[in-house]
Image (spheres, rainbow, N blue to C red):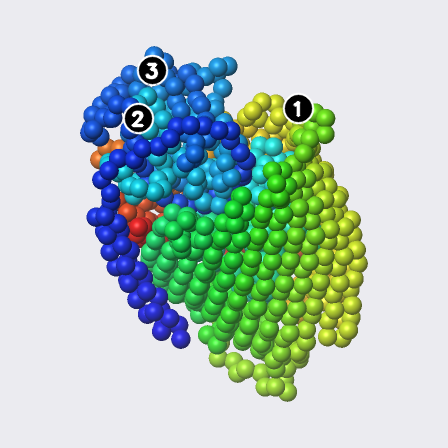
Amino acid sequence: MFERLSRLVLLTSFLSCLFVQAASAEKRSSLASNPTAYDTSTYPCQGGNEEGQVGRGITRVLYRQRPVTKVKNWLAQGEAETIQVTDVQLNRTQTGLEIVLDTQDGKLLPIDATKFRAVRNTLIADIPNAVLALPEGKEFQVENPTDDIANVRVTQLDATQIRVSVAGKQALPITEVILITGELAYILNPEGEEPDEEIVVTGEGASGYRISNATTGTRLDVPLLETPASIGVIPEELIEDRAARRGEDLIPYISGVTLGGGDDFQGGLVPQFTIRGFSVARQVYLNGLRENTRFLVRDLANIDRIEILKGFSSLLYGTGAPGGVVNYITKKPQATPSYTVSFEAGSFNFYRGEIDLTGPLIENRNLLYRFIVGLQKADSFYDNVEDNRILIAPSLTWLTGNGGSLNLEAEYLQQNANGISGIKFFNDRFFFDRSYNDSRDDAQRDNYRISGYFAQPLGKNWSINLSGQYFYTSRDETLFRAGFFEEEILNRFYSRFTDDYYQTNLRGEVRGNFKIGASEHKLLAGVEYNRLKSEFDGPGGAFFGSIDVANPTFDVPVPKPEELQFSNFGFFEQKDWGVYIQDFVTLGQFRLLGGLRYGKFEGSSLDETNQEGDFVSPSVGLVYKLTDSASLYASFSQSTEPQRGLVRDGGFIEPKKATQYEIGAKVNLLNDRLSLTTALFNLTQTNIAESDPADPDFVIPVGDVRTRGLELDVTGRIAENFNLIAAYTHFFEADIIKSTEELEGNRFNNVPRNTFGLYGKYTFTDGALEGLSLGAGVVYVGEREGDIDNSFEVPSYTRVDLGAAYQINNVTFGLAIENLFDIRYVASSSDRANIAQGSPFAITGSVKVEF
């Protein structure tokens, strides 16, 4: 089946290329040749809001009063001299929006429309040889000028260049946006008749690694500078630059986040994020709703960005880990047509192809589509390990009017991947470059998802947001693991089972803006319901013999049915619901974010063991804005997390409880091109449980753990063409402060004392090297305890990575190198038998064609 689908996808890719090339040629040949006129009458602006996605625009030059008939003539009118922009006006016309730039003595700005570009949801016009000379020296900014435009900004990009940017809501603005300077006007997103002199922008400018807004922290349109929490964002550009295959590949670039676990029998088959020392494998979200938690590894083909909220998450996300949440944001349909085909090949027989098609389905662009296909066939540096995937992800967006939208998504992900039985620590050494995976190991998962997201304003200041999704996962696995040491013997473990998993997530929210006296309020109130159920069956499992750590062999017969020691027949079901209210208050220089959540949860299993309870989670955070570019914040939050494991007597493990305190500072530098965030946190979690070493089907209580640390993140552009993302974390403490297993005083395993990650990329925009970008990065992870008994220590490591890309017109060639010096290192560790080795030297090449 996989081979047939491979051929089908490759054939579809080829036909798509031919179709798009033909369509593009036909459109270019049919452009109209008559100039367009427009009415300059104005009326007041109205409201809207924002969301960022990728798009591409067409720029047209319009003429007012005295047209310049040749492009080369109007380009030559404003050479060399630096011109002052003394005033900016924003006018609403009968056909759209005007941005008028007035200059000193009416001089003409040297605008080159061929440099205009569309980045995500934003139209951008960079104007050279210009400086802002506005009253009081401020930059120009207007929020929500129309229903589909979030903001219009005119800023000083560098000493002699200004930027005009127009950010849309669901996509590039549908409202016609006209930039006016002197006698010339430019339509940034044309609609209607085509102009006399049309300039088509085929390139797509880099947005950089810095993201100024994220919805994960508050679910409101609040800048990160005003959010009382530390939020890291991994944009699509970084995902592509590093040729990432899963989200965990990018965690070195976000402070406080490390790779969790060793393999725990499911290495590579479950999320492995750890935030501030605590596993958040069950706190992974998709568009703000709980991700499929039954052994799904999120494919990145349809992911726009990854937002990581550290701490302060219980109010909006309910029953969850105290460290924070990981939120994948999917790519949305775009109003501007875009067609992308890409192919990657790399080390360890890695091959991957993707198709991404988007655009309007009807002429008025109110109904948009996106269709994404991903196909992957890959082995691993471990023997007998593969990761083959098929992803099909269609989606539709209906712009309902007045700023409203309905987004529908469907997804099918098939993953044929056997989990990694990691390397071992034995006789005081790590046995690198050995595979303990049996060739008979096999695991197939078929994942299905349908989701809906509806947002509709109710007048000017209120709106409703409804979200829901349904998952179904079918799992068929035969597992052979070398998973437990008994004294000095490494035991083999066999398990055979099938699993049907069902998950439903529903959420409804009301949001409103209002004033009380001098204070401004953004209120959010909501209700949420989550249900999951797993029905599993199979012959069962058993320990069967031992394995030589130094020279593993796999010629041991499979246990007979009468030899099986564990049953794989059963089910479990969990439900939780909550109601919550949150208010974001602006009062002068202060921002107060506070709220309360009440929740209930219940669970049941085959033996009719029931677990139920309720909880209250308060959260409060305060921000003080020192300036428009700097702020201080402090926050407090509590959380409750039901644990899904069963103890040996058949009952549920008790929920975990946590309390966190955090203070921090944020600053934007270099005209908001560069962002710095630092935080100090103190986090305590009680009643932590871990897998039972004697039986992976059960868990055992460990005790209470406290972590305290310092985080620092730097993201943005330190120069116009130089993107940078860097993160540093220091753990002052990560200790077991109370234990049921005589572990008190031990350091929590797999928590490094220091981590550092950095990646920088420089892009050449002119000269002989135009189109070339070069990147380099370094990852450092300090020493850490290998297991909860602190019986061995994992040494530190430093890894160097490289990247490069070269763009020629609409074709981009890429290269990514991981572990340049081919060092051997431990990526994560659970215990002596469950250790994940980091990848040796690996190289991935890619080619991407955009239409």
- First-in-chain label (2 vs 1): 2
Q: Which residue is mark 2?
A: 64
Q: Residue 782 sits in which quadrant?
A: top right
Left or right, residue 47 beside residue 353: right
What residue appears at the point 62 percent right and 44 percent down from the top-left corner?
458
Q: Which residue is mark 1?
A: 588
- First-in-chain label (3 vs 1): 3
Residue 243 in view (yes/no): no
How far separated are the C-alphas under marks 3 and 1? Answer: 38 Å
Q: Residue 634 sits in which quadrant?
A: top right
Numbered tag placed on residue 106 in the rendering: 3
Quadrant where the image shows the N terminus: bottom left
Label 2 element class: loop
Query: Dot 2: few (<14), some (14–19), or many (≥20) neighbours within 10 Å?
Result: some
Q: Position of residue 533 (x, y in %)?
A: 66, 68
Label 1 element class: loop
Q: Amino acid at mark 3?
A: Gly
**Of 79 and 2, the residue lying toward us:** 79
Query: Dot 1: few (<14), some (14–19), or many (≥20) neighbours within 10 Å?
Result: few
**Of 296 and 28, the residue lying toward us:** 28
What residue appears at the point 55 percent right and 41 percent down from the top-left corner?
214
Figure label count: 3
How far separated are the C-alphas under marks 2 and 1? Answer: 43 Å
